[in-house]
Image: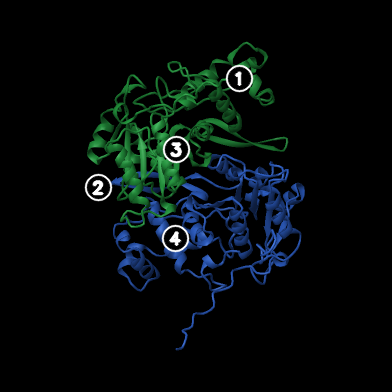
Chain colours: A green, B blue
């Protein structure tokens, strides 16, 4: 851990040191907490832990935008947002799209937990992913006027990178849908889709003239939150993670699951920075759990030099 | 592909060549079918494709053995099989084990497909895995008098190794339970548990004096067979596999899913060797699908020099 600072966006302090100490004790052969490569599993909540979740969770914004416009109309109406967006990106796919028969959304917004229970019946998971990718490539956050994909936390990107460079397999474990998190985890975090775990709807396999297709059904199948996060990790990864990062009450059980391994690292992101991001309490459950189990709270305002990545400087032509 | 033969247990012929050609066309930068590392996903059925499944599917033998003996008694009765097996291996774990209240098994043995629907209520997934590991370390196949872990197909081990060496991520996609396949995939195939996908029961998270535990519930949640295999692959991996191996009708849809990518490799293992393994038909559905989609049948008798790995030679002391 000499030479280049692997966490340059973190102020020196106990939290930065806790992360560096963890990497040292789990990857140094002489450490009593040394962990074999295969067991280096780290889990990260997504919304509010790796990227911003205010004023609304990003997938909710996406779905709200999606439902505002009937894409069947949009394709023929070039002036609408979806016409431009989908017309260019999806063309042929949408021309085949079934009517939105069961377009309905239930946002379960209570106590920071949510699940989109019912939305698009018969839409293929590939279509949903394409829409999410297209939307992510264009949509701007209302306050910061930047793409959502740039509103990831730079200090957490450095943690993901540091972990990966030390043989850790990083998993996203999100209450958001499996289909959305898979669309954003590669461009945002360089994490492949098989390392993204989200809430799921039931799916069905259909045969369109010999072409198999996986379609969404408006029936909730698995809610990846609270105890669900532990059950998902157990089901998908088997091994206990030895590092876990979260920010809300839905992450407490996941952190407890990780903290059963001696030497584990569990931290909660605390949104304390009204100026550079948002200021809000994670709720008493999180604060109590952090105290009870000794999980450090990452103080966004005081721990982070930088919240979001620096925008790329404007590209200017070099005069001859 | 010069020098050492990567598939020494395969006779020269069209099927061996098909595998070598596939590796060449997907990993040679100059090939029109070249595939980036991240998309090199291969899926393998387990029972009858990577290891033997006769006279009974191995997990069925395991569960039958498990249910023959009440482990609560067994711990106090050193003479019983389970007394010896569990007494040594599990000791403390079992002393805490809850009574088998809902011990019941439904073997759905019809047309080669099966699912253990109900078995042990409240047993933790960790316990089940430990039992499976202990059983696998001791149990012998009635005909071959060898541990089941040695009754994997040597030619398929070579395929797994060849694929892995060329950047492929190999997944087991089994109708067997997630919990059993994870116990055997690492010792048998060097495949980590997060690359094993199986049928699942519902689980619940329980708190035992501060210790969280994931327990099995006797409620089927997901049957990883037929269309289920495609839905599981879609849910877990996202990307389409570009190679798929199976042996029964429950694998047809998985092979069709993989074969939607140009240049994909799909093969069915055909059990034609009564002498060295077993001889049985995969059924007309498989034979018809193989003809319709052009999937080669691996003829165990004529394609494979060796079926199972050579037993290790006996260890003899070297005289001074």
- Chain containing the residue with disc 2: B
The quarter holding residue B202 reads: top left
Q: Nearer the viewer, residue A9 or B315?
A: A9
Where does residue A236 sit, x and y in percent of width and height?
47, 45
Picture disc at residue A121: none
**Real-space Cα distance between discs 4 and 3?**
29 Å
Residue that badge 2 annotates: B209
Residue at left offset 70%, top offset 52%:
B24
Q: Nearer the viewer, mark 1 or mark 2?
A: 1
Q: Quadrant of the N terminus of chain B?
A: bottom right
Disc 4 marks which residue?
Answer: B132
> Which residue is the site of mark 1?
A319
Residue B300 vs residue B128, the one in the foreground: B300
Query: Which residue appears at 30% of the width and 49% of the height?
Result: A263
For marks 2 and 3, give the CA distance: 28 Å
**In the displayed structure, does residue B265 sit left or right of residue B219?**
right
Q: Badge 1 sits on which subunit?
A: A
Same subunit, labels 4 and 2: the answer reads yes
* Residue found farthest to the top: A79
Q: Tell me which chain the residue with mark 4 is part of.
A: B
Describe the element under mark 4 as helix, strand or loop: helix
Q: Quadrant of residue A295?
A: top left
Q: How many circles with numbers are drawn on the protein?
A: 4
- Mark 2 falls on what kind of element? loop
Residue A153 seen in this snapshot: yes
Q: Residues within 10 Å of mark 2 (few under 14, many from 20)?
A: few
Residue marked by disc 3: A172
| Of the two numbered discs 3 and 1 in the rendering, the one whose residue sits closer to the viewer | 1
Q: Nearer the viewer, residue A60 or B58?
A: A60
- The location of residue B9, given as percent across then percent down, is 66, 67
């Amino acid at each position: 851990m000499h030479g280049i600072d692997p966490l340059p966006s973190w102020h020196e302090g106990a939290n930065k040191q806790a992360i560096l100490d963890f990497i040292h004790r789990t990857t140094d052969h002489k450490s009593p907490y040394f962990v074999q490569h295969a067991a280096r599993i780290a889990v990260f909540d997504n919304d509010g832990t790796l990227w911003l979740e205010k004023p609304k969770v990003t997938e909710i914004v996406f779905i709200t935008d999606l439902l505002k416009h009937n894409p069947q109309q949009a394709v023929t109406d070039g002036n609408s947002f979806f016409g431009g967006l989908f017309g260019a990106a999806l063309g042929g796919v949408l021309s085949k799209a079934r009517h939105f028969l069961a377009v309905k959304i239930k946002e379960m917004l209570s106590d920071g937990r949510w699940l989109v229970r019912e939305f698009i019946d018969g839409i293929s998971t590939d279509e949903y992913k394409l829409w999410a990718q297209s939307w992510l490539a264009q949509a701007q956050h209302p306050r910061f006027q930047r793409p959502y994909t740039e509103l990831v936390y730079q200090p957490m990107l450095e943690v993901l990178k540091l972990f990966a460079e030390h043989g850790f397999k990083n998993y996203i474990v999100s209450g958001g849908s499996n289909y959305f998190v898979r669309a954003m985890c590669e461009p945002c975090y360089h994490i492949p889709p098989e390392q993204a775990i989200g809430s799921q709807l039931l799916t069905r396999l259909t045969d369109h003239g010999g072409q198999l297709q996986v379609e969404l059904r408006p029936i909730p199948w698995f809610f990846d939150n609270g105890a669900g996060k532990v059950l998902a990790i157990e089901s998908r990864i088997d091994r206990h993670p030895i590092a876990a990062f979260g920010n809300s009450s839905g992450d407490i059980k996941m952190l407890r699951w990780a903290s059963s391994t001696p030497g584990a690292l569990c931290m909660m992101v605390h949104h304390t920075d009204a100026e550079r991001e948002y200021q809000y309490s994670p709720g008493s459950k999180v604060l109590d759990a952090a105290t009870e189990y000794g999980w450090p709270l990452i103080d966004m305002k005081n721990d982070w030099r930088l919240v979001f990545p620096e925008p790329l400087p404007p590209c200017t032509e070099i005069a001859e």
